[in-house]
Image: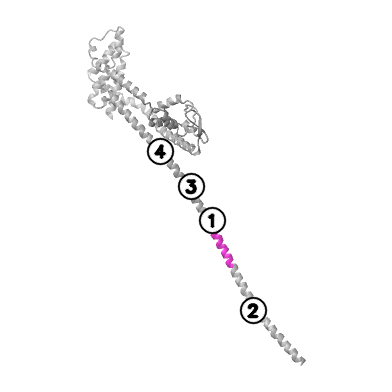
Amino acid sequence: MIEERSTRLLEQLESRAAALLGVLRESRVQQDALQSRLAELERRRVELEASNAELAAEVREEQAGREALATRCGELEARLGELEATRLELAEENRELDEQNRELEAHNRRLLEREPAEAPASLFHRQARRAQGLSALIGHRPRQPESGEAAGEPPATPEKAAPPAPEPSQADPEPAVEANLQGEASSEEAPSPQALLDQWYRRYASTFFKGHTRPLKVGIHEELTAREPWPEKLVRRALACYVNLPRYLKSVREGAERLDLAGEPAGRVDAAAAEHAHKKLERLQADRRQKGRPARQRGRKGDAAKGAKPSAESPRPDNARAAAPSSNRAPAAAEGAGQGAAPGREPATLEEKLSALLAKHNQR
């Protein structure tokens, strides 16, 4: 009985051990599966971290690109504002230049209307009038011997009958003087912009300076228009003559005090106005340098050609003088008889100059 009991116990122990071994094998299989699953998850985590890093880099690049685009957009907007300001400034300058051109054309028309009908400019209209115009111009020369005759010089008897032709021209200065007086009166009624600016230098000595210059108050043209009896266009042009001076543009610095017509402080110059004045000064200096270069080149070419030009044109006065009618030589002979040998060269010199001028006009 004891043996049977021990045998049952052993069998139970063996079955229990076999069950435990099975459980152990199953747990090991599950552990291996879990480890493989963990390894796979770890691998996926690494991949996700790498992908996340790539996405973060792309986000940073996109953000940097967006910031660059925003910066570029700001620069373009600033450039657009500058171009718009430049366009407005150029449009204003163009308008002022158009007004100046119209005023100059009107002034030119007034001068042409006041010009007498027998002006020397008619010499160049037709070649058939050359001799007549030349004799008329030379006919003005015998006015000098009259003083000599009053002093007691003997008059020239045969050739003195030729000068009566200039008598109508001697009566012409009176209308010319009247026209000049009318021109002066009209200029007094409406002065030029520079003349009006000269008046401001005297009347507003604490605001407009010829030496050390200070910026003007914003909107000062309205006060000047209200005080001055002249049109607003003339006031603006006179003010433009002052504010476009290099010394004024140099004085427009950021923080500088502006002055009103009484010379009292009226605000300060802001950064935009200072930058605008600086750019305008640079543009003005660049324009002056560009205009100065061709002038110097023309001056050098003129100096180089000055030596060869008299030799090429020297025969022309002789030919023109030989072709002139004898009536043109009569006043010169009368002057030679009345004044002597030394003053006698002056009509010949004038005749040579006029002949050279006519020959030059014929070449054109």
Q: Crowding at label 4, few (<14), some or many (≥20) Cα neighbours within 10 Å?
A: few
Q: Image point 32% across, 29% down: which residue?
A: 106
Q: Could you give the CA–CA distance between mark 1 and mark 4, rounded to whole angstroms? A: 44 Å
Q: Give 350 or 64, whichever is nearer the viewer.
A: 64
Dot 3 corresponds to which residue?
Answer: 74
Element under disc 2: helix
- Badges 4 and 2: C-beta atoms under 8 Å apart? no
Q: Crowding at label 3, few (<14), some or many (≥20) Cα neighbours within 10 Å?
A: few
Q: Could you give the CA–CA distance between mark 1 and mark 2, rounded to whole angstroms? A: 50 Å
Element under disc 1: helix
Asked if the magenta segment contains residue 282, the reply would be no
- Badges 4 and 3: C-beta atoms under 8 Å apart? no
- Badges 1 and 2: C-beta atoms under 8 Å apart? no
Q: Position of residue 228 (x, y in %)?
A: 41, 28
Dot 2 corresponds to which residue?
Answer: 26
What's under tag 4, amino acid-wise? Leu
Badge 4 or badge 3: first in the primary sequence: 3
Quadrant of the rendered structure where residue 327 is? Answer: top left
- Badges 1 and 4: C-beta atoms under 8 Å apart? no
Residue range in magenta is 43-59
- Relative placement, left or right, of 89 versus 66 is left
Quadrant of the rendered structure where residue 336 is? Answer: top left
Q: Crowding at label 2, few (<14), some or many (≥20) Cα neighbours within 10 Å?
A: few
